[in-house]
Image (tube, rainbow, N blue to C red):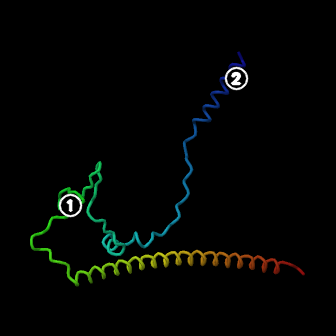
Amino acid sequence: MNIIGNVAQGLRDCWADRFSHKFLPKRPPLRQITSLPIFYQVDFKTRQTEVGLDYGPPRAHLNEAKLVFREGKWEDENSSPPERSGLQSPPSPWREKASETQKKNKALLEENNYLKLQLELLMDMLIETTVQLRLLENEGQVKKGIFQKRNKNSYF
């Protein structure tokens, strides 16, 4: 009988120890601050003009039919867009020059974005190496300070 009482008392103590403490989860580590790329700091319209996010009209491919959404209606992709009466003029040299200029402009914008990305990457690399250099300098100064303290305390 005494053995059963001891076992029961041990179980009670075990359960009391397990469930008497409050639940205190560990705090998660702090997040490191990361800088957003320049691309995300610019508003939508600027991004659209610089990167050329012109997606065109929405398209759908159902069974074997290809559809395009034009002027509020779904039309067959192979059919030409509806002609506007008298508003469209035949192609002129000005339009050709304008389209060439737009192509050059788009190429220059892409090159500009590539160069901005390279600059951002190089700046990140420069910052990282500068931080590492400063850390090494600080470690060197700490070691110098310890060495000088030892020399002052020595009796020789």
Q: Quadrant of the C terminus?
A: bottom right
Where residue 116 appears, as percent x and y from the top left, is: 45, 78
Where residue 100 appears, as percent x and y from the top left, is: 30, 81
User: Secondary structure under badge 1?
Assistant: loop
Label 2, residues with CA under 10 Å away: few <14, some 14-19, many ≥20: few
User: Quadrant location of residue 134?
Assistant: bottom right
Q: Quadrant of the N terminus?
A: top right
Classify residue 138 as left or right of residue 25.
Answer: right
* Looking at the image, residue 9 lies above or below residue 45: above
Give me the residue at 52% from left, 75% from top: 121
Give the residue at the far top of this rendering.
1
**How many marks can you see?**
2
User: Quadrant location of residue 86?
Assistant: bottom left
Give me the residue at 33% from left, 78% from top: 103
**Mark 1 is on which residue type?**
Ser
Q: Name the residue under label 1.
A: 79
Where residue 40 appears, as percent x and y from the top left, is: 40, 69
Classify residue 138 as left or right of residue 115.
Answer: right
**Mark 2 is on which residue type?**
Asn
